[in-house]
Image (cartoon, helix red, strand yellow):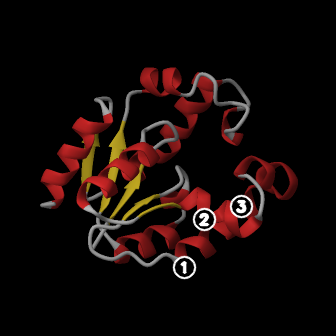
Amino acid sequence: MGVILIGMMGSGKTTVGRLLASRVGGNFADLDDLVEERAEMSVREIFETQGEAKFRALEREALSSVRLDERSVLAAGGGTPCNSVNLVQMRKMAPLAYLRVPVNLLVERLADAPSVRPKLDSGIEAAIRELLKEREEIYETADFVVDASASPSIVVEDLRGRLGW
């Protein structure tokens, strides 16, 4: 069985996920990439032209199509586990690992991201604080809560130890 990485945008899900899969000889997938492939447009474009509801529907479809084998790593979108149907499905697929990062570091990592991150249009720090307030309780229910403020290599080794990989 693989692992599903959850957490805020900027927490390192894609970076850590790719590195983890590479180190253990597993497959990596990013749910946002799968949505973009299906829609043939970027997440930002989907939000702007079709709205968040359409994006979330595409996200549910993409999640349903994912098959994780041993040592597969899936980086979920930041809001993916906030939908109860998605969360139940994800829990059936693999253990969840929440990559926890403090707000100040998320702000630093996402400083240049508002142009590509649809939920950051209203001011980066305020938006991150609000999203984290909405999502953190769900994130904290993950099987593993990992301090992802360290370098990706350290986070990967932490995850490998917790997963027994």
Q: Is 111 on the left or on the right of 11, as rendered?
A: right
Q: Which residue is mark 1?
A: 65
Query: Within 10 Å of the Cα at label 2, are there few (<14), some (14-19), or many (20+) other Cα atoms?
Result: some
Question: Could you say which disc has been placed on residue 55 in the image?
Answer: 3
CA–CA distance in space, label 2 to label 3:
12 Å
Question: As shown in the figure, which amino acid type bears the numbered disc 1?
Answer: Ser
Image quarter hosting the N terminus: bottom left
CA–CA distance in space, label 2 to label 1:
9 Å
Task: Give the x, y percent position of residue 73.
Answer: 37, 62
Badge nearest the viewer, 1 or 3: 1
Q: Secondary structure at mark 2?
A: helix
- Residue at the spot 59% in from the left edge and 72% down from the top edge: 62
Q: Which residue is mark 2?
A: 34
Near-viewer residue (101 or 135): 101
Please, is residue 18 above or below residue 91 in the view?
above
Q: Earlier in the sequence, mark 2 or mark 3?
A: 2
Question: As shown in the figure, which amino acid type bears the numbered disc 3?
Answer: Phe
